[in-house]
Amino acid sequence: MGKDVSFKFIWDYIKKFNRIIIHRHTRPDFDAIGSQFGLKLALKKEFPDKEIYAVGDLNLEMYHAKMDIIPDNYYEDALVIVTDVAVTKLVSDKRYSLAKNVIVIDHHENECDFRIDYQVIRPKYSSASMLVSDILLENNVTLDSEIASFLYLGVVTDTGRFLYLDSLSASSTFKIASYLTSYEPDISLLYDLLYTETLEYRRKKDTFRDFKVRNGVGYRINTPEIVRDSGLDIGSINRGMINLMSGLQEVPIWISFTYDPNDNIVLGEIRSRGIVVVDVARSYGGGGHNYACGFSLKDFSKVDEIIDKLGELVKENVK
């Protein structure tokens, strides 16, 4: 765990390095990509003579981001910035550990569990893209439409299109959204990306609409056979289908368990409407936001146990 520092300090620290390599979490969502690539483009615009790279695994949520292929020796004398994650096992591209100087910019509740110099970890921020945006804003960095598009995409998606906001975070989130939209991000293109899908995908999506309910907890188990037969990537199933259970008065908490053939594990995703569920995710080695979080399991043996724990939260919080 590194020393927590101010936005100005972290920006001045970044200025000291000629080569900067930006990492984020594996299986990236749009906030991971938005914060990572938005920061890369902002640094490249502000410091055109510096070498700025973004690395990590690929999936279908890359927007226009392209990852850089760099050799190991690039990490010598480089600054590594890790965005949207502070947990070792979730960082994409483990070569971040080759760098002497590492900082973390994250908005999750988890404490950083690897060696870093400094951190800007702010759990009150609704997204890592919002946090990166605020750092840029406080340091008077001029953006452009492309930078704003990446960052705005992260803000919109990690707030569930501004649904997952409470009274404390709403004002600051909309302030950053206003700041980003002043640079005219391509909102129509972004919303087409988020809200339109192919007919084939819609039909496959419909096969995931069935789920069960127990003690106020909606749940779905995506077995190896279901995953295989769907022909979809894990991200599309694990994160893409979870909210098919949302919006029901009788279901304040919903969860999915999805077999991941890539790593031979089971991925859990939890969502809730106003009930803090992140502690349950943490108890199984995961984490995330109060109302939207995830974890991984060795197999399906803990499914009933986890559903029962979530059922207790419903009992305690819903009168």
Image: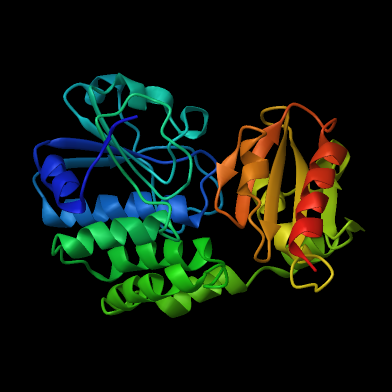
Looking at the image, residue 275 lies above or below residue 29: below
Q: Where is residue 33 drawn, in percent x and y?
A: 43, 52
Count up the numbered dots.
Answer: 0
Q: Where is residue 198 drawn, in percent x and y?
A: 68, 68
Q: Where is residue 279 drawn, in percent x and y?
A: 63, 44
Looking at the image, residue 54 lies above or below residue 318: above
* Color style of the picture: rainbow
The one of 134 and 75 positioned closer to us in this rendering: 134
Q: Is residue 290 left or right of residue 103?
A: right
Q: Is residue 16 left or right of residue 86?
A: left
Looking at the image, residue 104 lies above or below residue 148: above
The one of 160 and 171 positioned closer to us in this rendering: 171
Q: Where is residue 159 drawn, in percent x and y?
A: 52, 65
Q: Is residue 304 left or right of residue 3?
A: right
Quadrant of the snapshot with the C terminus:
bottom right
Rendered image quadrant of residue 244: bottom right
Q: Residue visible at 89% across and 61% down?
A: 210
The one of 172 and 70 positioned closer to us in this rendering: 172
Q: Residue visible at 80% across and 74% down?
A: 249
Quadrant of the snapshot with the N terminus:
top left
Q: Residue visible at 43% across and 28% down?
A: 113
Note whether residue 206 is visible.
Answer: yes
Note whether residue 233 is visible.
Answer: no
